[in-house]
Amino acid sequence: MRMVSRKDFLKSLGLAGVTVVAAPFVLHCRSKDDEGEDVTIDNSVSTACAVTNSETEGPFPTKSPSTLVQTNIVGDRTGVPFEINLTIQNVKANCAALQGVIVDIWHCDKDGNYSEYGGTGMQSTNYTNYHFLRGRQTTDENGNVSYTSIFPGWYDGRATHIHVHIYNNVGTSLLITQIAFPEGSGSAVELVNASSDYSGMTGYTYNSTDNVFSDGTANEMSTLTGSLAEGFKLAHTVKVNA
């Protein structure tokens, strides 16, 4: 009988590259890992309640997020109306809603530029004195925060995405992650970028080849609803170890 390594087993569950911090699962059987040691796998805990992937914060993190406590993060930017709705859950409490944690988000404008940066090779347009498309909120009793924004554009090497940094109520970092967008024919990404104000899809980097999302987006993929005429709404759940 063929023995299955720990890596192969995780791939079969869709968990390759995911940091699982829930209690070990039990299959009531034993296997061997890559070093030949016995591995006990506990299937009694749902694999759905696992910490969302951690991702890079840079290269354009918010410099002073405590000064940007706001729901409307549009600033002077124009674009397709966009509502961002996030739910934060606590893996240590069986993914119950997590109240009172701080959620910072930031994303680029329709042209792929970030506020607070620019005038360099990474971003030629200088927006160092602007603070658009950045905001901080604290989760309510249902673990929810919402932001009013515009649909993000994209830039070379990256698929459409949103950055998220979550802290507990005393400011200790819990998770830095990113939110991915569904792609394909008829998706919001294609519809928005085909509109007159956006950059189109020529040269677009898809999730499968994105340098952050290419290892998978299973727990970073958002749900989008809406239309160009009415605007779009994003819903996404982020799970942290609190």
Image (cartoon, helix red, strand yellow):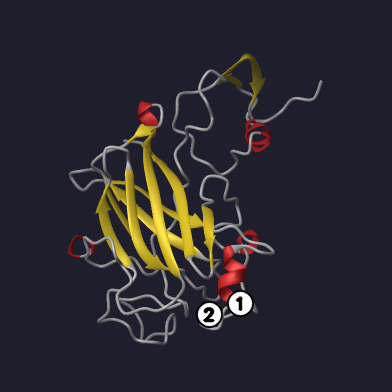
- Indicate left or right for 90 with 23 as reference: left
Residue found 37% across the figure and 67% down from its top: 149
Residue 56 position, x and y percent, is 43, 58
Residue 79 position, x and y percent, is 44, 76
* Quadrant of the rendered image containing residue 106: bottom left
- Indicate left or right for 145 with 186 as reference: left
Q: CA distance from mark 2 to mark 1?
A: 7 Å
Task: Mark 2 and mark 1 in contact? Answer it, CB < 8 Å.
Answer: yes
Residue farthest along the front direction in this orientation: 229
Residue 34 position, x and y percent, is 65, 32
Residue found 68% across the figure and 35% down from its top: 12
What count of labels does the image hold? 2
Image height of 41 relative to 119, above or below: above
Q: Residues within 10 Å of mark 1 (few under 14, many from 20)?
A: few
- Residue corresponding to mark 1: 194
Image height of 141 relative to 102, above or below: above
Q: Residues within 10 Å of mark 2 (few under 14, many from 20)?
A: many
Tell me the quarter of the image containing the C terminus: top left
Which residue type does callout 1 highlight? Ala
Image height of 183 relative to 171, above or below: below
- Indicate left or right for 41 with 239 as reference: right
Q: Secondary structure at mark 1?
A: loop
- Residue corresponding to mark 2: 198
Which residue type does callout 2 highlight? Tyr
